[in-house]
Image: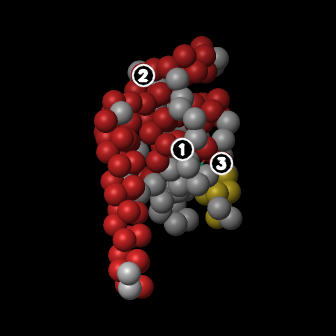
Amino acid sequence: MSRVGIQLTFLVWGLVLVAEISAQQEKNPVLLRGAALYQKHCAACHQADGKGVTRLIPPLVGTDYVSGDKSRLIRILLQGLNEPIVVQEEEYYSPMASFQYLSDIESADVLTYIRTRFGGGASPVSVKEVQQQRKKLPK
Ligand code: HEC
């Protein structure tokens, strides 16, 4: 087979693989619901691709806030965030409002979605984990 032929074969296999992974994600109800919630509640600021807006809104792609400690991530969603933070060597300090009004399921879905899509496939957030953090919120 010619070099171009070999390269084309790899390209096609690559495309098939990508299509299969996204087809699997599309069938997962948690990720489907999470994607819709993300579009509705988060994308206006963090952008559809999760890359944020330089110097104004921090990215979600590849940040430790998203893929790291789940309790901290859940608290950010339930309480909002209003302190100076450094994300990928850029400083951000503008308030993010709380999303306490989202249900436990909605919160788990949207956080699982961002961990899967932007957090390199980090483990899912369960409804129970959201409930545990909600109980600890200052009344
Ligand atoms: C009105 C704009 C806005 C919306 C809407 C918004 N955020 Fe944020 N978000 C921010 C800002 C601004 C910060 C930085 C807060 C700070 O500096 O203290 C932030 C920080 C974060 C962080 C921690 C830092 C990072 O980049 O990893 C996470 C995680 C996060 N947001 C997730 C979400 C999720 C999930 C949603 C939707 C449910 C959401 N945000 C909706 C503006 C927004």
Three-letter code, disc 3: Asp
Which mark is in front, 3 or 1? Answer: 1
Residues packed near mark 1 inside 10 Å, few (<14), some (14 to 19) or many (20 plus): few
Identify the element where label 2 is drawn.
Answer: helix
Q: Nearer the viewer, residue 16 or 46?
A: 16
Measured as percent of width and height from the top left, residue 18 is found at: 38, 56
Three-letter code, disc 2: Ile
Residue at coordinates 34% horizontally, 66% vertically from top-left?
A: 12
Which mark is in front, 2 or 1? Answer: 1
Three-letter code, disc 1: Gly
The answer to whether mark 2 and mark 1 are in CB contact below 8 A is no
Q: Which residue is disc 3 drawn over? A: 64
**For the residue with label 3, is its CB less than 8 Å from the closest atom of ligand 1?**
yes
Label disc, if present, on residue 139 of the rendered structure: none
Q: In which image quadrant can residue 68 be found? A: top right
Pointer 2 or 1: first along the chain? 2
Q: Which residue is disc 2 drawn over? A: 105
The answer to whether mark 3 and mark 2 are in CB contact below 8 A is no
Identify the element where label 1 is drawn.
Answer: loop
